[in-house]
Image (cartoon, rainbow, N blue to C red):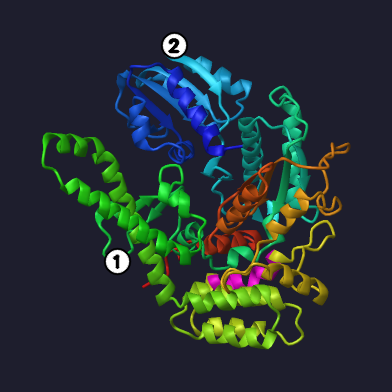
Amino acid sequence: MNLVSAVRNYVGKMIDDSGVGVMKILLMDKETISVVSMVYAQSELLQREVYLFELLNNFNREPMRHLKCICFIRPTRENIENLCNELRNPNYNLYFIYFTNVIDKDSLKQLAEADEHEVVREVQEVFADFLCMARHVFSFNIIGCSKKNRWKHDVLQRCTSGLTSLLLALKRCPVIRYQASSEMADELAKCVGNLISKEAALFDFRHTDVAPLLLILDRRFDPLTPLLNQWTYQAMVHELIGIHNNRVNLSSVPNTSEELKEVVLSAEQDEFYSKCMFMNFGEIGSQIKELMENYQKTAQSHQKIESISDMKTFIENYPAFKKMSGTVAKHITLVGELSRLVQVNNLLEVSETEQELACHSNHSEALQHVKKLITNDAVTDLDATRLVMLYTLKYERHSSNDIPGLIELLNRRNVPEEFRRVAASVLTYSNASVNGVHHQSLSESPVAATRRLLKGLKGVENIYTQHQPMLKEILENLLRGRLKESAYPYNGNNPVRVDRVRDVIVFVAGGVTYEEANTVHTLNLANPDVRIILGSTNVHNTKSFFEEIAASVSDGNAYDISRFRDSEKLT
């Protein structure tokens, strides 16, 4: 159940099948180029004789008839049309065509008719219709999957085909469970189940003692987690700077050198990042110090070149030394910028209040802290808005809540209108009633709240990491066989039921967070006999979650928060 290995194997096989000892070009679409780049470094592909990378919809490519072309694309109507045009006027010698998912017979017929020059040598289906964010995390990079809390039709189709592709890549034919309170989860479960039945021959895998499980959830089951500041390395980088397809744009960071304007954060290619990505920020300092000390020792040893033997050793080790140098520079820049943002934006105090809202129930104290921070100029508009949203979610039913007063404070500090509208919409988003079942509110009964608080405080290391995502509780109940069937029923009229689980794929419609990815990583370590994979329409930070809420509650009027992604230049 290693997603990165699954996709790497597909890409490696495509390259090998096109022949050894010949120059190749990799022709992709705008999605598959991300699929490949997230599991393979460009240098690795160059070593495998792939020398050029092009987009299928680039119609100004120079003909290079001496090259073999590996075409790796999604089987969309647009891609089929573009590929047919390519084959009618081929730019390359031979074509090896690979689709990321099942392709229909009509499309195959179109391609056959377009291959007038008989340049196609291979047409295959490989199942890599998803993005590997990590070995246990995948995404479709879709923000705004619903409207009025109903699936957008094209997104539902994308998630259905993407999930079946993932299952085929892992060679799993699962039992499906879904969140009963969500019509979206119900509909996706049915679509995936129907497609598995339709393509039964593809899913005819060897039966295992314990059937794999696909659990489909709706982001609205826990709107709290995406609104909290994070304190693990990977999650902090995504929250404060942003990670897109394993790349981080540092062009706005003061005094950044040209080579560090954009950096790659990949656990497969960066040993330090793989080691530290789930560590709390307080631990990263000592790791950075150790990394720097090792680099200095290596640099000093390279300075002692006194003989031909020393020169030879230096040349042999230079690539590794240069890579180490880049790793040191990258992480020192990242950690330095995170530290700066934590200080100038008063994030320690902001995060302490967020955790207080998430884990405690002292209304008057919480209200005063939120008001104080909203009126603090050091606090960003984004943080001020999410504090109001957290307060709203927690105290919507409190008899003396002051939600209107907090919204007015946002108005007074001239928070962008899109932020204010999202703050006012968070209850509509989180409390949507579907099929007569109301989503779990954050305003629990006193007994339930006390039980959750005591459970949450066990082993707490500091006040900034008290909160635990609700996904953890759901998965722990699943692993113990205690996940209620009334709340998470099986799909189908006569479904197969499982008493225990081993391979679990969790898919969250509406987005997940890196905090939840960390939760799954921790559960996998604690339960070596269980393998859990987490996927979603998107991996959120607060800004992208704002967009998700905006799209979900939109009534068709202009509601574009995306233009505010870069509106706050954090200084």
Q: Residue at x 57, y 64 (%)?
A: 546
| Residue type pointed to by label 2 | Glu
Range covered by the magenta-colored residues: 419-429
Q: Position of residue 563 (x, y in %)?
A: 46, 63
| Front position among marks 1 and 2 | 1
- Judge whether residue 159 is colored magenta: no
Give the quarter of the figure containing the N terminus: top right
Q: Residue at x 40, y 16 (%)?
A: 19
- Counting labels gives 2
Can I make out residue 51 in this image? no
- Judge whether residue 428 is colored magenta: yes
Q: Residues within 10 Å of mark 1 (few under 14, many from 20)?
A: few
- Residue 335 as seen in the image, left or right of residue 168: left
Q: Which of the marked residues, 1 or 2, is nearer the chain's N terminus?
A: 2
Depth check, front residue: 538 or 502: 502
Q: Residue at x 70, y 65 (%)?
A: 430
The residue beneath circle 1 is 254
Residue 206, quarter of the rendered image: top right
Note whether 278 is above or below 322 in the view shown.
Answer: below
Note whether 494 is above or below 567 in the view shown.
Answer: above
Depth check, front residue: 102 or 336: 336
Note whether 45 is above or below 252 in the view shown.
Answer: above
Q: Position of residue 110 (x, y in %)?
A: 54, 20
Q: Position of residue 525 (x, y in %)?
A: 62, 49
Give the quarter of the figure containing the C terminus: bottom left
The residue beneath circle 2 is 118
